[in-house]
Image: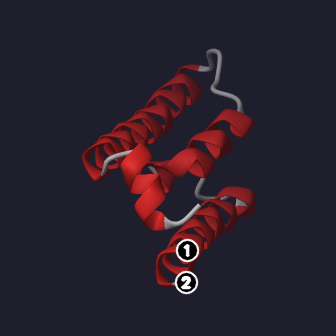
Amino acid sequence: MDIQTFLKIFPLKYVVIYLLAINIIGFLAMLIDKQKAKHGSWRIPEKTLFLLTFLGGGVGTISGMYLFRHKTKKLKFTIGFPVILFTEIALIIYWIVQ
C-alpha cells in the first residue's frame, strides 16, 4: 500500500491523534509501573511496555523511562526501546520516499 492509499483510509489527523494517544499511554505506563515498583505491588509486564513501544509509543515510553528513572539500568530497555523507535522511523521514511 502506498502513502496516498494509506492516508485515504486513515486521514492524517487520525494518525496524529493515535500517535499522541499511544505515546501518552506509554508515558503513563512507565509512571504507573515506577510507582508500583516503589510500593512493591503488582507491576506492568515488561512485554506490555515493549508492546506499547512497538505500537508507536516509543517517544512516550523512552521519555517516561528517563524522566522517572525507571528501567534505565536494564539494557533490554535502554537499547530495545530506541532500536524499536528508530527502526519504525526508518521504515516510515523508506515507505514515504519509495
Vertical side of 93 occupied by 44: above or below? above
Percent position of residue 42, x then y: 65, 16
Percent position of residue 66, x then y: 44, 57
Percent position of residue 50, x then y: 66, 45
Q: According to the image, label 2 marks what residue?
A: 98
Contact check, label 1 and label 2, Cβ < 8 Å: yes
Identity, as a three-letter code, of the amino acid under mark 1: Trp
The reply to whether residue 50 is visible in this rendering is: yes
Question: Which residue is depicted at the point 47% across and 76% down?
Answer: 96
Vertical side of 72 occupied by 16: above or below? above
The reply to whether residue 66 is visible in this rendering is: no
What's the mark number on residue 95? 1
Identity, as a three-letter code, of the amino acid under mark 2: Gln
Toward the top, the furthest residue is 41
Question: Which residue is depicted at the point 42% across and 34% down?
Answer: 25
Vertical side of 90 occupied by 70: above or below? above
Question: Which residue is depicted at the point 59% across and 61% down?
Answer: 1
